[in-house]
Image (cartoon, coloured by chain):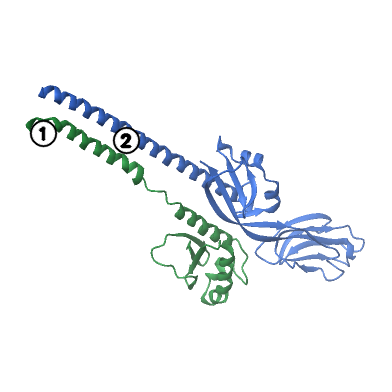
Amino acid sequence: MADRAQLSTPVAEAGVGVLLIVGVASVFVLGVPAPDDGAAQLDAYAEDAGTVLAGESPRHQGATRLAEVAKSRESFERERSALDRRMDRLLPDNLLYRVETEYGAVGYERPAGVSYGTATVTTEHGDVRIRVWYA
Amino acid sequence: MRGQANLLALAVALIALTGAMVVGLAIADGAFATAESDATERQLATGIAERLTSADGSLAARENVLNATAVVSFDAVALRSALPGLSDRDVAVTLDDEPVAATGDDVEGYSVERIVLVERTRSVALDAAFDGTNRSVTLPRRTDRVDVRIDRSTNATVTSVRIGDRIVRRNASGLTGNFSIAISRYRTATVSIEADGRLAPDEADLTYYPSRTEKALLEVTVDG
């Protein structure tokens, strides 16, 4: 009895050691977080949409299309459905969006808890913020 | 007896520990290597996409606007020379799932999508645009330049060319020749010429370059 107990001590210690090492190694296998590709891609979508819209001619007056919607409440109300259609056509089908200006927002309500990409375009009348997320 | 048994157990324990250590290190090394190559791939794909869509990229007309002609003539050689840092990695570029250029077959790996516009420009000539006394033409579509050709006229001297209110070319003793005038894409332009007499219809004409854009998805894939 006493023999067996003393014999197994180093083996038991080794067992504990092996467990420890395997535990640390498993962190590398399981614990390295998968890189969040979605967020970078969503940011790219938002930036691109902002760049494209900022490079388009205004429909009535203003410097660009985005400057026009950020200009005043009237011009925002007048342009909101056109902007909505344009965003809808521009973005890939699996994306939803929201464009926020000082005078209101077009697009969809952003659900809580989804990761989204965001881009802010500065215009002469204020910032326009674009958010996109996967539908 | 007890001492020898202990020594044996110690030896087994050490071997077991060393083995576990080696396996553990191998796993850790593999995990780091994978993470690193993933990052390089991602970085390359993002960088290439950024370069192709930037205003001075080899495909682009403006930022996020690609020139349709440049897209058609773009190939694997152009891709390699546009991106000298590729070394032995393969890259494939597609536009709306249509292949544009690829440095290898069946490139699979990390890919980045960008929203772009593809711009096609054509030229429209307005012959006899300025007839006699009415010497002002509003271009029907937005264009980024307009070419004005003025011939030597027998009974009139053209002194200036205006875009809207702005005088872009002026010569009191008479303008003749071809003038390429850059104008704003954001405004409709009115081109007018001033002459001190009656212009024959074929003595002045202009050409403008309206563009059409279509949205497209540019996808860049870098193999692992």
Q: Amino acid at mark 1?
A: Ala
Q: Colour of chain A?
A: green
Q: Where's residue B95, x and y in %? A: 62, 53
**Helix, strand or loop for disc 2:** helix
Task: From the image, state whether disc 2 or disc 1 is nearer to you.
Answer: 1
How dense is the environment of label 1, judged by Cα within 10 Å: few (below 14), some, or many (20 and up)?
few
- x and y percentages locating residue B11 in the rendered image: 21, 25
Q: Residue at x 14, y 26 (%)?
A: B6
Q: Residue at x 86, y 68 (%)?
A: B131
Q: Secondary structure at mark 1?
A: helix
Q: Is residue B70 left or right of residue A17?
A: right
Residue A76 visible at all = yes
The hue used for chain B is blue
Tell me where residue B103 sits by quadrant. top right
Q: Tag on residue B24?
A: 2
Give the mark count: 2
